[in-house]
Image (tube, rainbow, N blue to C red):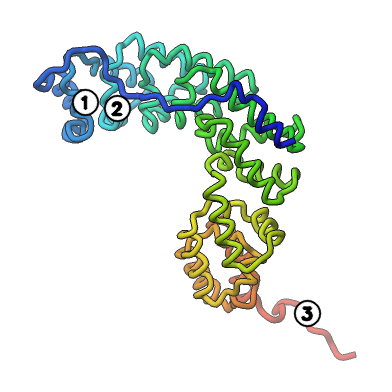
Amino acid sequence: MLRHIATSLCLRCQCVTALPLNLRPCATLNSVENQQTVQALCDLSVDIQKVRKLKGWVLHQSSAYTKEVAELLKDMGASGSVIARILAAHPEAVLCRPEQMQAQRELWMSVCANQKELVAIIEKFPASFFTPFIHHDNQRNNITYFQSLNLNKRIISKLMASAPQSFSRPVEQNQVMVCTLQQAYQELGGDEVNMKVWLLKLLSQNPFVLLKPPKVLRQNLLFLKDKGFSTAELLLLLSKLRGFVIELNPHSMCRTLAYSQDTMGCSEGELRDIILNCPALLYYPETLLAERFRGLLSTGISMTQIKETPTVLDLTTQIVNYRIQQLQAYGYDIRTGSLEVLNGTKKDFEMSYRKLQLRRERPLFNPVAPLKGDD
């Protein structure tokens, strides 16, 4: 079945290359700064020294639309300080023609709830909004395609903002990658009912998955299959790792798995169980794993405990040490207790820590309970 994944769609596989987003128009480049641009930016309280240091070439362009950009942003509700931050971070924006900026505004409003939301996106991802106009048709076609997948506007706008290259390229390239992901999910036993939710979470957590060659996914799944993972286990890994499975490669996984097995002294079957509990072990480099193993063992934690709760390897040594100190303050001996109490987010740990506090502070008897009388 997985061999079929390796051969299907092969004629349509396309290696993805990121498209440049620099906006260098075909205007004349002056040997001296355009004083009108400099003055207009200063009037907007833009950090001109930052612009000179990072994007000085913008100030040498003979044509710029600084006031027009500011008016557009102001009309969308951006404050003066927000406009100044946007232009300091992405001064290339002043090189966009007004009609092009208006077209971008209309395009983005088709996936944004309101102009306030769009301004927040521009402030955080200005390069995603002020893209070369030559990509406008591709952006519009990709929006239409992702809407056809029933992805909501919030997800689409997040994709456009965080991975603009995926919207700047021809829609056919995204179709190939999405098709490959869906096919892999179904051929591993996933059902169509859950596929939409899975795809939505995948694209939300790792939007750059669209920019990876489809063959990478197939190679990684075949490698893991050869390591003994069943079809059901591969589906579980694909769901847990989501898009991050495409960040891997067989060579790095082979080295990491060999190191983990040797360090923990476990069999291949035990290692597979550990990986299923802690999939991140597949992509942690050996140096990082060595540091975390040393950190855990130095606290008195045994290798047996680590194998029983491998997810502690997701935590940095600093976090582990801090949490152990907090637990010890309330009499919890990590060397004999479960490591589960260490796991989870900061909020998860605080809840576990609070339970220990309450347990220690709870009186041995209820002082308001009525005392039993003599029989």
Left or right of 250? Residue 81 is left
Q: How far is disc 1 from disc 3 in space, using C-alphas?
A: 74 Å
Rendered position, 247 above or below 56: below
Q: Residues within 10 Å of mark 1 (few under 14, many from 20)?
A: some
Amino acid type shown at disc 2 = Ile
Q: Quadrant of the N terminus?
A: top right
Q: x%, y% of residue 103?
A: 41, 11
Q: Residues within 10 Å of mark 3 (few under 14, many from 20)?
A: few
Q: Which residue is mark 2?
A: 83
Under circle 1, the secondary element is loop
**Residue shown at the point (55%, 77%) measured from the top left:** 300
Left or right of 96? Residue 304 is right
Looking at the image, which residue sits at the far bottom? 374
Q: Which residue is mark 1?
A: 44
Q: Which residue is mark 3?
A: 370
Q: x%, y% of residue 20?
A: 36, 24
Rendered position, 288 above or below 82: below
Amino acid type shown at disc 3 = Pro
Front residue of this view, candidates 264 and 371: 264
Q: x%, y% of residue 177?
A: 58, 27
**Residue shown at the point (65%, 33%) measured from the top left:** 6
**Residue shown at the point (58%, 18%) measured from the top left:** 145
> For residue 101, which quarter of the picture?
top left
Left or right of 25? Residue 125 is right
Rendered position, 298 above or below 157: below
Mark sitting earlier along the chain (2/1) = 1
Under circle 2, the secondary element is helix
Mark 2 vs 1: CB contact within 8 A: yes
Amino acid type shown at disc 1 = Leu
Q: Quadrant of the C terminus?
A: bottom right
Under circle 3, the secondary element is loop
